[in-house]
Image (cartoon, rainbow, N blue to C red):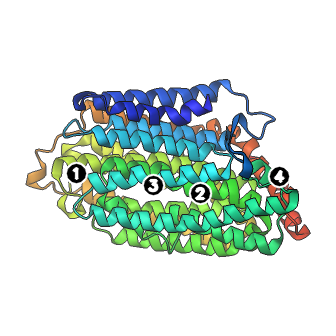
Amino acid sequence: MLSVIIFFPAISAILGFLIENKSIKFYGASIALIELLLAIFICVNVDFQGYDFVLTHQVSLIPSLNISYFVGIDTISLVLIVLSAFMSFISIAALSDDGNLKHLVISVLFLESTMMGVFSALDMILFYSFWELSLIPLLYIIGAFGSKNRIYAAIKFFIYTFLGSVFMLVAIIFIGYLCYQKSGVFSFNLLDWYKLGIGENAQIWLFLAFFFAFGVKTPLFPFHTWLPYAHGQAPTIGSVLLASVLLKMGTYGFVRFSLPLFPDASLLLSGFVCVIAIIMIIYAALVAYAQSDMKQVIAYSSISHMGVIMLGIFSLNLIGLGGSIFLMISHGIVSGALFLLVGVIYERAHTKEICEFGGLAKVMPKYALIFFIATLASIGLPLTIGFVGEFLSLFGIFKLNKLFALLGGFSIIVGAVYMLVLYKRVFFGECKEKNLSLKDLNFKELAALVPLCLLIIILGIAPNLILKPLEPSVQNIISKMQTRAVNSGTKDKISSLNGGSKL
């Protein structure tokens, strides 16, 4: 079942070359919808209680090195798989019907397969393969369908992410060799790695190697400079998938690998990571406020929100970690909605400059309402999906360090300022004469945006729909950190941070 979810979009993408251009959007949306229904089927029918991973499937690929096709999921993987499937479907469904869409839709389906592989892989060579393969379709989406500086943006994206991944590959090979030293057999099986004792000094170097790969993808300061440029040049569908899902590959890597594999290093370097996260929260928020381009405001707001996610992850406790994963879902939905909304106005006005608008609420009331809902979620208003993840992440880091929580909370204040100022300048005031003829959202656009708005409200009111299923898997991560720590001080600290915690 899991292998079907991983490879169904890629196989369908290959068959897509046989489909006529006029039918390719319907074909792609149908494939993405089937993929989403398969993911929902797993949610409804698979019991995750009492298991580390379910739907595991293993096939040996290179027996001499013990490399295999080994996949399996827990609820952390599952929520990201559902998010990937949902946003892929929405992105394809929201495409305009103009132009040659065949290669764009095919690229999105290939990208969806690689994302499913990243969130399912339990063999580290397999994980690395899916991780690197995800670069190719997005590189093509930006380079072939982006704006005038798209080639530079695509190359910058590729160089940053590829070079970061090289450090991870070296670390993966080294840990495989550690397995050989201790057992006489190479192993890249994550479950074997969870049982491997790694000294504190080695943990630090290995943590840093993974940190470069995941930090570039997240992206952390100062590795973030590729992201605003990629967003600025990417087509709408590229920005939606980049913000909604691909950035989560980095934070997922920290949760799945860095914390449980290197618990002592994670605690030792948590302050360092949190300082970087706080810098990116405040810096990106201030830069977002200074932007004149709507898309750049949202791009920098993404960097700021990813900083809050990093604080939650490196709070090293159940509440913060659970909140950070919820915030991954929240940010995926909200940023996806905002980038779709910017794409809508760009199609009509052929500009994203804030100064070119004003008074749009009068001529596009439905557009203004949906943008308002997404804005409220972005600033973390209670009863929206944006509030829950931010609150839990900051509450979690408060247990580790009160100053970090205070500084992290600054993002909520500044975030409210730049998003509300953006909304005011675009939707209130006098409407320019050239914008009086702009058409409001059509049925196709409403069909893509209304489900996102409903999720923003429903999951804001009932966050336990995600939090409760997440709790056992998050607790497993915390337990692995405690049992694998080689320093007794690390064990005691993690235990004290998690005493009596529940999501």
Residue 313 seen anywhere in this rendered image of the structure: yes
Hey, which residue is sitting farthest left in the picture?
A: 433
Dot 3 amino acid type: Leu
Q: Are marks 4 and 1 in contact (CB under 8 Å)?
A: no
Instruction: Write the residue at 89% across / 65% down.
Output: 492
Dot 1 amino acid type: Tyr
Q: Are marks 4 and 2 in contact (CB under 8 Å)?
A: no
Q: Mark 3 vs mark 2: which is more N-terminal? A: 3
In the depicted view, which residue is nearer to us: 103 or 421? 103
Tell which tag, 4 or 1, sits nearer the viewer. 4
- Disc 4 designates what residue? 479
- Disc 3 designates what residue? 135
Dot 2 amino acid type: Thr
- Disc 1 designates what residue? 346
Please, what secondary structure does the residue beneath circle 1 have?
helix
Q: Are marks 2 and 1 in contact (CB under 8 Å)?
A: no
Q: Are marks 3 and 2 in contact (CB under 8 Å)?
A: no
| Left or right of residue 445, residue 307 in this image | right
Q: Rate crowding at label 3 as few (under 14), some (14 to 19) or many (20 or more) other CA atoms within 10 Å.
A: some
Please, what secondary structure does the residue beneath circle 4 have?
helix
The answer to whether 272 is drawn above or below residue 415 in the figure is: below
Instruction: Write the residue at 46% across / 49% down.
Output: 244
Q: CA distance from mark 3 to mark 2?
A: 17 Å
Q: Mark 2 vs mark 1: which is more N-terminal? A: 2
All told, the count of numbered labels is 4
- Disc 2 designates what residue? 251
Dot 4 amino acid type: Ser
| Left or right of residue 267, residue 441 in this image | left
Q: CA distance from mark 3 to mark 1?
A: 26 Å
Tell which tag, 2 or 1, sits nearer the viewer. 2
Q: CA distance from mark 4 to mark 1?
A: 48 Å
